[in-house]
Amino acid sequence: MDLPELLRLFFSGMWGTLELFFVALIGSFVLGTILAGMRVSPTPVLRIAASTYINVVRNTPLTLVMFFCAFGLPFLDIRFGASSSFNSFIYASIALTAYTACFVAETLKSGIATIPVGQAEAARAVGLTFGQTLGEVILPQAFRTVIPPLGSVIIAMLKNTSIASAFNNRELISAMRNAIELRGDLVIPILFGTALGYLLLALILGRVFDYLERKLVILR
Amino acid sequence: MVDVEKHYGDFHALKHVNLDVQHGEVVVVIGPSGSGKSTLCRTINRLETITSGTITIDGKELPAEGAELAALRSDVGMVFQSFNLFSHKTILENVTLGPIKVRKLSRAQAEEQAMTLLERVGVAHQADKYPAQLSGGQQQRVAIARALAMKPKVMLFDEPTSALDPEMINEVLDVMVELAKDGMTMVVVTHEMGFARKAANRVVFMSDGEIVEVDEPEEFFTNPKSDRAKDFLSKILTH
C-alpha cells in the first residue's frame, strides 16, 4: 500500500469520525437541553426523572454504554436499517448522544444558576409560560455563559468517538488499525498521523468555541 | 386583597392585609424597609405566593401556577427595582417579546407598537442597543414600555427608582406621572414622597407587615394619624 492509498484510508476514517461527531453533537445538544430544562422544571416528576437519568448514565463508563447500545439494542431487535455498518453507526451515535447529553445538561444547569433570578421573574411577569421563559430568556443566556466549559465537553466527545472503533465503526482509529496491519513498518508515523488528525479537529473546535464566546458575550 | 397573610418560615411578612384598588386609581405604598411593601406588590401577580387569604383581579381569583396564571400576569404589568430587562435581547426585542409570544401579534405589528411606546418614554433612538448600553433611567423607562406593550389592566411598580442615580429619578417619575394622568391603575411601592403627593389617589402606609394607615396623600403627609406614620415621616421629611 503506497502513501496516497494510506492517506485515502485516513481521510475516510476522518470522515467517519466527523459523521459520528456531528450526529452526536446535535443529539447531545437537543437531549442535554431537554434534560437541563427538566432539571429546573416546577414538576417534581420531571426533575427526578432527569436527575436519575443523569446520575446513572454519567457514572457509567462510555465503553459500557456502547456495549449496551451495540449489543443490547440488536438483542431487543431494535435495528435501523439493513446494513450492519449503518446499524453500528446508529448504535454508536445513540451511545455517544446518551452519554454526552448528561454533561451538556449539567453544564447548562450550572449556566442557568448564574442567570439573575430577576430575568425569569420579568419573563413570568410579562405572561410567558414556564416553557417560554426557559426557551426565550433563560436558556439563551445560559448557553452564552457556558460556552467555554461546553467547548471542553464537546472536545471530550470528539475524542470519545474513538471508542466506537471497537464496535464495528469506520472512523479514525479503525482506519489507523487498518493502516498498521497493512504497513507495520510505518507504525510510528501512522500513530503520529492519527494523533495529528484528532489534534487538528480539536483545535478547530476550540477556535470555533472561542469565536462563539466573543461573538455571543452578554453585557451585564 | 382580603385577609392576606404571608410567612417566610417564622417570619410573618404580611399580617392581615386588606386592600382594594379601584380602576384608574393610583395607590402608593410607603413605609420603612422590611415593612412588607415589596412583598405586597409581588403577591399581586403571584411572584410571591401567599400563605392564606385571597387576591382577586377584576373579580377573578389568582390562579395557581400554569397557563392561566401566565395569562393573568400578562394583564398585570410589573416594573422592578433592578429593571430586569432581558440582557441578551435588544431594547426593541425586550418590548416585542411579550406581544409576539403571548399576545400573538405579528412581528411588524409588535415592532410598530413598541416603537410608539419607546417614543413615548423617550428611548426610541436606542431601540437597537442592548440593555447594558443604556443608563439606569433609560433602562427603567424601557421596562415601563415593556410592561405597557402588554396593554395591562394594572401596573405594579416595585421601588422603580431605588436603584437609580438621583439625576435619573425624575425622568422615570415623569413617565409614571404621565401614566397616572392617563388613567392607568397603578400600585406603586416607592420612597419618592414627591410622586406620592403629585400622582397618588391614596397612600398606604405599611409597617411590620401591616397596613397601618390609608389616606389621601395631602391628609397623610400633613396630618398622619398613627404614631408609626408620624415617626416615619419625621425621619424622612427632616432632610
Image: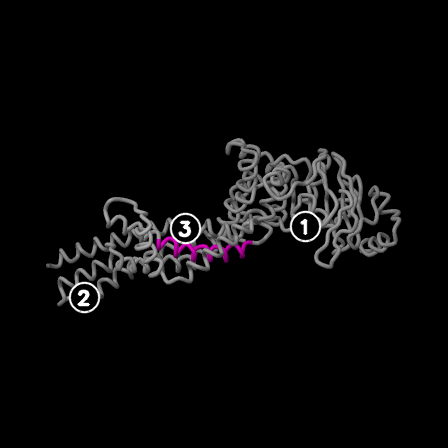
Provide the residue span drawn in magenta.
A95-115
Callout 3 secondary element: helix
Q: Chain of mark 1?
A: B
Q: Which mark is residue A29?
A: 3
Q: How is the image coloured?
A: one colour
Q: CA distance from mark 3 to mark 1?
A: 46 Å
Place of residue B72 in the rendered image (x, y in percent of width and height, measured from the top left):
64, 38
Q: Is residue B97 left or right of residue B2?
A: left
Place of residue B100 in the rendered image (x, y in percent of width and height, measured from the top left):
53, 36
Do marks 1 and 2 share a subunit? Answer: no
In reply to whether residue B113 is colored magenta, the answer given is no
Task: Tell me the residue that label 2 is attached to.
Answer: A189
Q: Is residue B152 left or right of residue A7?
A: right
Residue at image position (70%, 41%) is B174
Name the quadrant of the C terminus of chain B: bottom right
Task: Tell me the residue that label 1 is attached to.
Answer: B167
Name the amino acid, label 1: Glu
- Disc 2 + disc 3, Cβ < 8 Å: no
Name the amino acid, label 3: Phe
Q: Crowding near pointer 1: few (<14 within 10 Å), some, many (20+)?
A: few
Q: Which mark is residue B61?
A: none
Q: Crowding near pointer 3: few (<14 within 10 Å), some, many (20+)?
A: many
